[in-house]
Each structure stands twice: as C-alpha cells, then as structure tokens.
C-alpha cells in the first residue's frame, strides 16, 4: 500500500485519468472529490464488497445452469 500525505486542496492522479482531491478536513473525517471517466466505476469499499457478495451469491444458486440456458435462448 502506498501512503501519501495531502493537505486540503491538494490532489493525486491515478493512471492518468483519475484525480482524487482533498476537499475538506474536519477532525477525523476527510472529504474527497474524485474525477474519473464515466466508464470507471467508483464505489465506497463497503458498497463494493456488498455488490461482489451479491454477484457471488447469484452465481451460486441451484438454478445457475438453468438460468444460463434461459439467457442463451433469449439471445439466439
């Protein structure tokens, strides 16, 4: 993990197209702004983990093979 120090209104750039700016600091809370292309998803980690778990659960249902066959039929 890379750890950086930034002050209010300072930023960092990731992969030439994502910019993260420190907007405000109040006590132990930091407000950040993220500029990224629309095709780059940006989630809070707890939301990302919930999405990932939901996707995993959906793939582990008993009817997965049946669901895949139904999808194939829809597109043929």
Image (cartoon, rainbow, N blue to C red):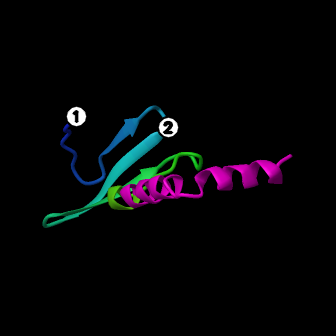
Q: How many marks?
A: 2
Neighbours of disc 2 within 10 Å: few (<14), some (14-19), many (20+): few
In this view, 10 is above or below 46: above
Q: Nearer the viewer, residue 8 or 61?
A: 61
Whether residue 49 sits left or right of residue 38 in the image: it is left
Q: Residue furthest bottom?
A: 26
Task: Give SS at disc 2.
Answer: loop
The span picked out in magenta is 48-76
Task: Give SS at disc 1.
Answer: loop
Whether residue 3 sits left or right of residue 46 in the image: it is left
Neighbours of disc 1 within 10 Å: few (<14), some (14-19), many (20+): few
Q: Nearer the viewer, residue 39 or 74?
A: 74
Which quadrant of the figure has residue 19? top left
Which quadrant of the figure has residue 12? top left
Write down the residue under mark 2: 17
Magenta-colored stretch includes residue 73: yes
Measured in 3D between alpha carbons, the distance from the residue under mark 2 to the one under mark 1, in whole angstroms, is 18 Å
Q: State the residue at coordinates (77%, 47%).
A: 72
Residue 45 appears at what percent x and percent y? 34, 55
Whether residue 60 sits left or right of residue 39 in the image: it is left
Report the quarter where the N terminus lies: top left
Residue 47 appears at what percent x and percent y? 39, 61
In this view, 64 is above or below 11: below
Q: Residue furthest right?
A: 76
Whether residue 5 sits left or right of residue 52 in the image: it is left
Residue 34 appears at what percent x and percent y? 42, 52
- SS majority, magenta: helix
Closest to the camera, between mark 2 and mark 1, is: 1
Write down the residue under mark 1: 2
Magenta-colored stretch includes residue 47: no
* Residue 66 badge: none
């Amino acid at each position: 993990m890379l750890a950086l120090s930034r002050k209010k209104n300072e930023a960092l750039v990731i992969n030439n197209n994502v910019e993260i700016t420190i907007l405000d600091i109040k006590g132990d809370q930091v407000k950040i702004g993220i500029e990224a292309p629309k095709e780059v998803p940006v989630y809070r980690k707890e939301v990302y983990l919930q999405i990932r778990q939901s996707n995993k659960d959906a793939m582990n249902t008993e009817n997965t093979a049946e669901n895949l066959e139904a999808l194939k039929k829809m597109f043929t």
